[in-house]
Image (cartoon, helix red, strand yellow):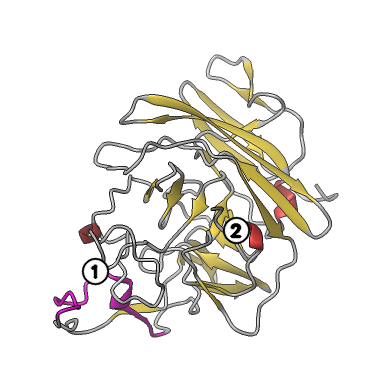
Amino acid sequence: MPAGEEATFLQVSLAGAVGCLVLGACLPMVACQTSDGAGSDSGTSGSIDITGATFTRRSADCADYAQSYSSAVVDVQRRLGFEGFVEIVASDDSCTLTSNAIPNHDFDQQGASFATPTAALETTFVIKRHPGVASSPTALELRSYDAVMLNGVVVDLLAAGCFGVGDGKIGCNDLSSAWRYDPMSPSANFGTDVHNAHTQPDGRYHYHGDPLAMYGESSEVSPVIGFAADGFPIYGPYFDDGGTIREARSGFSLKIGSRPSGASDPGGDYDGTFVDDYEYTGAGDLDECNGMTIDGQYGYYVTRTYPWVLACLKGAPDASFDKRP
């Protein structure tokens, strides 16, 4: 941590314990204070326990998060415990983030309907420390992940389901196909849990929108909760607008009227069931990729409406975010 910089803390709530952990300060072990006053390790093998953590740090440099992290969480419906891990290692130009894809919060709550059981899958991503804005945005791809959160879970926004293709849930692999479902729409019925996540065929847990975790619902500006494939940070929804803390607003709007009702069209009103129900109008705070620049730093912001996290990449994605065969 640079001289003169205050330590930034995570507030971690555990069953029977409340502690403060330093996120990004490279400490081999951090002790938490339990309710009975005794100290307890924050993790195993020198890792920091981020189970249920609320992050507060806003540094856009992934190197400031270099450390090993662990968590102990539960698949609620299966009543099965999981141990998550994340390790971030920094070099001059990039950070390497390795995780087993298990979140730092419980998941698969009642009401979710995962297609496959959640599995621990070790994956490594390279995050650029000094990302640049490309001459034109990069479209999101089905063949790659869009981002990785600091808890090690990927963001994979696009569904592989389109109207009129199979059962509408999988098999729509042509990005030019119309009427791609938005998994965040309640009418799409993608079986997500309370964290807007579910599993892929291989069991990988992944977010389709706001994780509803890792940041606080408060009067404070939101922290960095992850990094996009191009290296730019992802913040929670809150920012300082001239002294007022408020949620960032998406620049996308629902189209007005009704969809076409031809043989290959779903018909009905534009209600957000499909990605094609939206268009970028610039009506909010954020650009076409769902980001903005504050104090010279570009970043993406979680929003309560489409596109939820990001709609494109402002920079060039790293190849490590490509999905493996």
Q: Which residues are magenta?
A: 263-281
Reply yes or no: does residue 268 show up in magenta: yes
Q: Quadrant of residue 169?
A: bottom left
Give the residue type that dot 1 points to. Phe
Q: Quadrant of residue 93?
A: bottom right
Q: Which circle marks residue 163 in the picture? A: 1
Reply yes or no: does residue 60 show up in magenta: no
Say how many tags the image has: 2
| Towards the viewer: 224 or 99 | 99
Q: Residue at x 83, y 50 (%)?
A: 2
Q: Which circle marks residue 321 in the picture? A: 2
From the top left corner, tell me how far across and down residue 294 is, in percent: 61, 72
Q: Are marks 1 and 2 in contact (CB under 8 Å)?
A: no
Give the residue type that dot 2 points to. Phe
Q: Which circle marks residue 149 in the picture? A: none
Is disc 2 surrounded by few (<14), some (14 to 19) or many (20+) residues within 10 Å?
A: many
| Towards the viewer: 308 or 320 | 320
From the top left corner, tell me how far across and down residue 269 is, in percent: 16, 77
Q: Does any portion of residue 223 appear in the rendered image?
A: no
| Towards the viewer: 267 or 213 | 267
State how far apart marks 1 and 2 are (Cα).
27 Å
From the top left corner, tell me how far across and down residue 251 is, in percent: 42, 78
1 on left or right of 201: right
Relative to 198, residue 170 above or below: below
318 on left or right of 247: right
Is disc 1 surrounded by few (<14), some (14 to 19) or many (20+) residues within 10 Å?
A: some
Dominant secondary structure (helix, strand or loop) of the stretch shown in magenta? loop
